[in-house]
Amino acid sequence: MPDTDDIVAALRAADAVRFGEFELSHGGTSDYYVDKYLFETAPDCLELLAEAFAARVGETKLAGVALGAVPLVAATSVATGNPYVIARKQAKEYGTGNRIEGRLREGEEVVVIEDIATTGQSAVDAVEALREAGAVVERVLVVVDREEGAREHLADHGVELEALVTASDLLESR
């Protein structure tokens, strides 16, 4: 199983950790940025992340938060053989109009996979959508916890956050 140092090295090798001034999706700013599209499109890094998630999920059904976590959940599904669903931020206005894509049974236990957690709101939204669809969700696994309140926000919703790496891990050897 890949350890924290392996994952930090892979994120850096993918050039996914950048320094400067960046605006974040929740409206705040940061002096560093973790570019999920760079680490999710680098096959070696994606494979390593899938291995790390696979070691933590057991035989549980997986869910990926659209759009950012879809490559992560798909790669983890292939690594584990566990089926997955995709949780959308909102129902689509065409086709089936689903907010949850894929097969999900009432009462099924699901682990959510997410790319980066800052406030944790997108993960909370996914958990709520899955719970409304009948899933039991108690864990969210993320590649990077920016340590800006996501863990506490998810805990307020009865969900444990587990991160492969934290902002402290990424920044400590800067």
Image: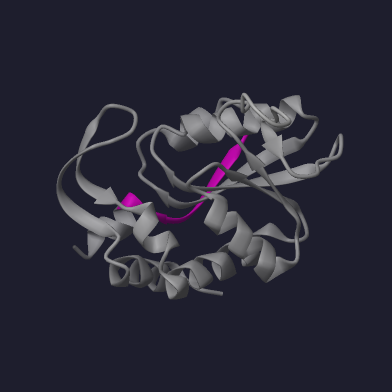
Q: Is residue 114 left or right of residue 139?
A: left
Q: Which residues are magenta?
A: 159-167
Residue 158 visible? The answer is: no
| Closer to the camera in the image, 25 or 51 | 25
Q: Residue at x 16, y 53 (%)?
A: 19
Determine the image quadrant of residue 98: top right
Measured as percent of width and height from the top left, residue 40 is found at 44, 60
Mark count: 0
User: How would you classify the magenta stretch by its main secondary structure?
Assistant: strand
Q: Is residue 7 left or right of residue 71?
A: left
Q: Is residue 66 above or below residue 26?
A: below
Residue 113 visible? The answer is: yes
Q: Farthest residue to the front: give it.
A: 95
Visual colour scheme:
one colour
Q: Residue at x 73, y 61 (%)?
A: 58
Determine the image quadrant of residue 71: bottom right
Measured as percent of width and height from the top left, residue 39 is found at 39, 62
Q: Is residue 155 left or right of residue 98?
A: left
Determine the image quadrant of residue 119: top left
Q: Is residue 73 above or below residue 5?
A: above
Measured as percent of width and height from the top left, residue 116 is found at 42, 46
Q: Farthest residue to the right: give it.
A: 106
Q: Is residue 131 above or below residue 47?
A: above
Residue 145 among magenta residues: no
Measured as percent of width and height from the top left, residue 83 is found at 76, 56
Q: Residue at x 58, y 70 (%)?
A: 51
Q: Quadrant of the C terminus?
A: bottom left
Q: Quadrant of the N terminus?
A: bottom right
